[in-house]
Image: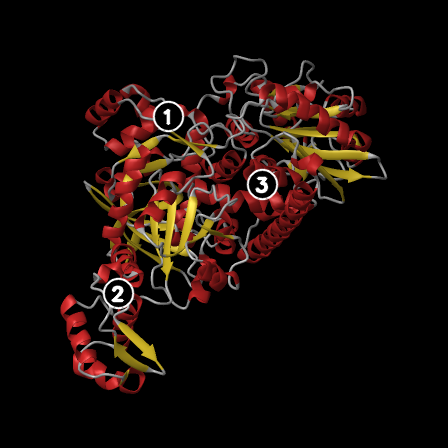
Amino acid sequence: MIESKKKWIVQQPNENDIARLQNDLHISSLAAKILVARGFTSSEDAKSILHTNEKNLHDPFLLHGMKEAVERIEVALENGEKILVYGDYDADGITSTTVMLNVLLDLGANVDFCIPNRFTHGYGPHEELFRKAYEDGVQLIITVDNGISGIEPIRIAKELGMDVIVTDHHEAGEELPPADVIVHPRVPEGHYPFGELAGVGVALKLAHALYGEVPEHLFEYAAVGTVADLVPLVGENRYIVQQGILQLRSSYNPWIRALCEISGIKQHEIDEDAIGFYFAPRLNAIGRLGDADPGVHFLMSENDSDAIQGAQQLNKKNSERKEIVNTITEQAIDMIENDPVISNSLVIVVAKEGWNPGVIGIVASRLIEKYYRPTIVLSLDPNLGTAKGSGRSIEGFHLYNELAKNRDILPHFGGHPMAAGMTFGMEYVDELRQRLHEQAEQCLTDDLLEPKLLVDVPLEISEISVESIEEIKKLAPFGTGFAKPVYALQNVKVRSMRKIGAADNHIKLELEDSHGTIDAIGFNKGYLHDEITYGVQLSFVGDLQINEWQGNKKPQIMISDVQTDEWQLYDYRGKKPVQRWINTLPLTQCALLAFQQNTVEYFKAMINEPIYLVGEQGTDYSSPYIVLLDLPQNVEMLEMVIKQYEPKRIYAVFFTQDSQFFNGMPTREHFAWYYTFLKKRPAFHLQNHMQQLSQHIGLNIEVIKFMTNVFFELGFVKIENGLTTINSDAPKRALTDASIYKKRVEQLEIEQKLLYAPYLELKQWFNERMKEYQYS
């Protein structure tokens, strides 16, 4: 048995819908399953995904306020007014700023930019920065990716005599800022056909309106910001990212080449994953740790030297960010593990002085992955007496609503169901934890607290080919709103497996079902080699990729999870030396069983875990995993263990220091010949002539000693002073009357059934008993 840490929820897309899409669109079952799983069940709907084009772009003047914004900017251009682009410190904000700078510079504007510092100014419009802009002679401020909540700073800007155009995509409050113009896809609601633009998407629409044509050269920036901001990749966003990726792959802009080089990405292979996992984190890192201005300068690089220097700076900041995140995560885990108040709370709340507020949201996500509970991570500032932090949640706990129930101690907070930010008095940290725990008790059931893995595309091996995987690329980009498929291969068997990598920390397998075979790779999953056994039906979850080597292409699945409900037999019989491998077993999860006391003594020196002697009173070995350290005295003892505990895993060691299997059992003829031999030689000194006797009779010395002991137990011989003499007065008795004879017969049978049987025979022996006791 291999258990996943998550509960798999395997969806089964409707077969009729799949067949219809295959027939109408001439696509593979794999592509059809993905479309159906994403809700595109009609052929017309599916075509919108397969054939995204410029028709997905809407007229920018459909955005409320666009006409007025363009007119005001044109006046500024005509009069040579100084314009300030006011951005944000994340990847969306940095790319939004870059897009707006590009278009304004192209149009001859007198323009500069400003991005608030996360730690000094916080998010959005800031009075101090607006006052400085006024002192610098700015007459028009254009916000990008922020501004919709900056009511007071914008009011001050207006009082100072500056005009303000807000371009934003964040949720608007009940009161809108007193800006001259607001360009927002959802304000007022219903006026624009697509309300899910990122901040950079709104900036791109303004650029489109200012240029008078689609600014294709700016798609590359818009793609990065759109993917980074996790907005739904459907509709207009989908077209923006598709076109942006094409631009990124062929662009001559030096920042792209530099970013690819520093990230280890081939430019012609850039996709949404490269943006999301390599580009965006580096752009985000610069603003998480300090001023984000270098991010804009990097994207505006005009030569390779500046671009390389900028990429190195971003990379350095990203490495620093990783180290800080790792350190805070380790400290937070230590707090959780060692404080029962925190560890027993349904909502984890951890706080510490000095934690970097720019990365604690990432830490909260890490803790969610480990503990799967709503989590809030707070940075304490004793000078201000505040706790500032970020929270992440799980399904079933609406973080914003639950925080809203505590407004009396949370004066500043915001967010949505799955994430939130907050600032409040540090004296209320413990109280907030207690309140949220009590609130969670009312809404979080055991089922909701169990992490789940949604598998939406179950497959058979026959459906997977190089052609079908390449066809999937037509469905890209995948992301928020059009999630990357999670594939499952169910009830397959392992045909071969081996550890790979310099440290044997990866695994390569060949999987098979009745339809064919496929390669599988598990990075950092080398441990599976010791958990997977042949002949067992397993289910794998992962991603599909094409492995290209020396011009040959093969499909493969990249393993992310594996499980099986079948019991498993792990064969450790005869492995030596014992000291080398015994601690590779999952000893802390197993019940270690011995049938003989001397086995307990032998292994005690090597194993720190308790070893149970089967049959001994007061032992409790209720684990579903058992290690059989030695052989039982008889089959019935082992059958008792199987019946009582129905193990899910059996590690068969069957260590024996005195195996008799290869010595065998002497025949009745051997006993008869030996008895006659001793009868003809009264007072035979067995010890002195053992070697010659062994050569003469053709039996090894151990067998001769065994026959002698049988005769001695039955009273057939006497041994005095090393001399063996026949007892002619001994009554006739069967050899089987001797306990030593019976014991050897039993030992040989046990060794044949358990120790020396081929693996499949041993598995079958256990299988028969498992089934018998399971249904009895």
- Under mark 3, the amino acid is Arg
Q: Position of residue 154 (x, y in %)?
A: 74, 24
The local crowd at label 3, few if under 14, some if 14 to 19, many if 20 or more residues have their Cα within 10 Å, is some
| Residue 661 numbered tag | 2
In the rendered structure, which disc, 2 or 3, sits on the residue that comes first in sequence?
3
| Residue 492 visible at all | no
Say which of 536 and 209 sits in front: 536
Measure the alpha-carbon separation of dots 1 and 3. 27 Å
Element at label 1: loop
Image quadrant where residue 124 sits: top right
Say which of 560 and 164 sits in front: 560
User: Which residue in the protein does label 1 denote?
Assistant: 38
Element at label 3: helix
User: Which residue in the protein does label 3 denote?
Assistant: 366
Residue at point 34% right, 33% down? 475
Measure the alpha-carbon separation of dots 2 and 1. 61 Å
Image quadrant where residue 737 sits: bottom left
Is 144 situated above or below 294? above
Figure quadrant of the C terminus: top left
Q: Position of residue 747 (x, y in %)?
A: 29, 59
The local crowd at label 1, few if under 14, some if 14 to 19, many if 20 or more residues have their Cα within 10 Å, is some
In the rendered structure, which disc, 1 or 3, sits on the residue that comes first in sequence?
1
**Extreme-front residue of the structure:** 729
| Residue 579 visible at all | yes
Measure the alpha-carbon separation of dots 2 and 3. 55 Å
